[in-house]
Image (spheres, grey):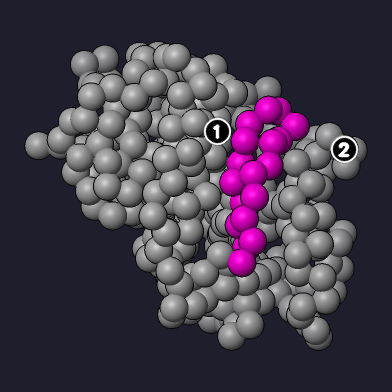
């Protein structure tokens, strides 16, 4: 593991959240990493207010986790196909996928005419795209999934091109009207860089849909929840989302909080490329109100990375 500065502004001064990372981490256990003497911290950047983790797994550890191990938690008691069938069979009022796709339809409406295409980065076993086609039956699609088992399942169940690898711009040699990054950007050490790369894969009128964990999770979930384990490197407020997007060359056209069926709080945003995207000053309420509602997450003294 390696120490990290703020992923958004590079700031080295931060506040540390108390009583946060003294529990077993399922994902570090999966890659047999000894972390018993590592001071795992959740930090709030003193410069821009971004909430992030340090230290983080390095590139070799991340490749091992996401290529071979990450989905093991999900597939303890089922196959990938059984998991796929379970998720797509949920009733709409119990389905987070149905909720977000209905929201997308309300935002996009008839914006795109003719034959459109969606690229789902981090598509898992393909359940989002499967449900997406129910609302957008004329669209084409492609997906990217680094995990072999889920990637192969998505390709077989969808009959669409699925790249079983990490995403890079130009991977499919075409442009898309919509790119989705659902529970993806919190997993990468430079989310703005990944997001910036998607501009090259969008049509001129294209949009990006982003969904990430909200800082509100700290006030509604237990401290040892899976949400706070090592794969999740960042937690977003509305303004830190806007600032990340601005750094990547995007402007946010709509943003809102959404509570999932399992009680987690996501921040979702719809964005379009913009050379004039503005950065926003930190609103203290974005972070301090969310984190201060639970005593064990109150901010400690300012520290500075070596």
Q: Residue at x 42, y 59 (%)?
A: 280
Image quarter of the C terminus: top left
The chief SS type of the magenta part is strand
Q: Name the foreground residue: 222 vs 278.
A: 278
Residue at image position (64%, 50%) is: 256
SS label for mark 1? loop
Residues shaded magenta: 253-270
Identify the residue at image location x=63%, y=31%. 264
Q: Residue at x 55, y 46 (%)?
A: 212
For disc 1, the neighbor class at 10 Å (few under 14, some 14 to 19, many from 20) is many
Mark 2 is surrounded, within 10 Å at the Cα level, by few (under 14), some (14 to 19) or many (20 or more) other residues, namely few
Q: Which residue is mark 2?
A: 93
Query: Quadrant of residue 71 in the image?
Result: top right
In the depicted structure, whether residue 259 falls above or below residue 32 = below
Q: Earlier in the sequence, mark 2 or mark 1?
A: 2
Name the spot of residue 107 as percent of width and height, x first. Answer: 76, 64
């Amino acid at each position: 593991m390696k120490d990290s500065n703020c992923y958004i502004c590079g700031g080295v001064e931060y506040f540390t959240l108390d009583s946060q990372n003294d529990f077993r981490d399922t994902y570090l256990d999966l890659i047999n990493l000894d972390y018993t003497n590592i001071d795992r911290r959740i930090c709030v950047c003193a410069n821009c207010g971004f909430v992030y983790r340090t230290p983080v797994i390095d590139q070799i550890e991340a490749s091992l986790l996401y290529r071979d191990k990450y989905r093991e938690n999900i597939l303890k008691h089922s196959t990938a196909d059984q998991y796929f069938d379970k998720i797509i069979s949920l009733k709409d009022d119990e389905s987070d996928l149905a909720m977000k796709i209905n929201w997308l339809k309300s935002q996009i409406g008839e914006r795109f005419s003719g034959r459109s295409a969606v690229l789902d980065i981090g598509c898992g076993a393909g359940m989002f795209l499967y449900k997406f086609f129910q609302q957008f039956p004329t669209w084409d699609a492609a997906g990217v999934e680094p995990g072999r088992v889920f990637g192969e399942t998505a390709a077989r169940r969808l009959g669409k091109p699925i790249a079983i690898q990490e995403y890079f711009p130009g991977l499919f040699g075409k442009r898309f009207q919509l790119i989705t990054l659902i529970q993806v950007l919190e997993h990468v050490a430079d989310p703005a860089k990944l997001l910036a790369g998607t501009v090259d894969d969008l049509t001129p009128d294209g949009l990006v849909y982003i969904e990430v964990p909200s800082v509100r999770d700290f006030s509604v979930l237990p401290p040892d929840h899976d949400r706070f384990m090592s794969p999740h490197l960042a937690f977003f407020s509305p303004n830190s989302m806007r600032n990340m997007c601005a750094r990547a060359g995007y402007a946010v056209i709509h943003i809102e909080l959404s509570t999932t069926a399992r009680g987690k709080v996501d921040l979702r945003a719809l964005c379009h490329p913009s050379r004039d995207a503005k950065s926003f000053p930190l609103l203290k309420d974005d972070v301090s109100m969310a984190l201060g509602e639970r005593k064990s997450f109150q901010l400690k003294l300012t520290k500075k990375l070596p």
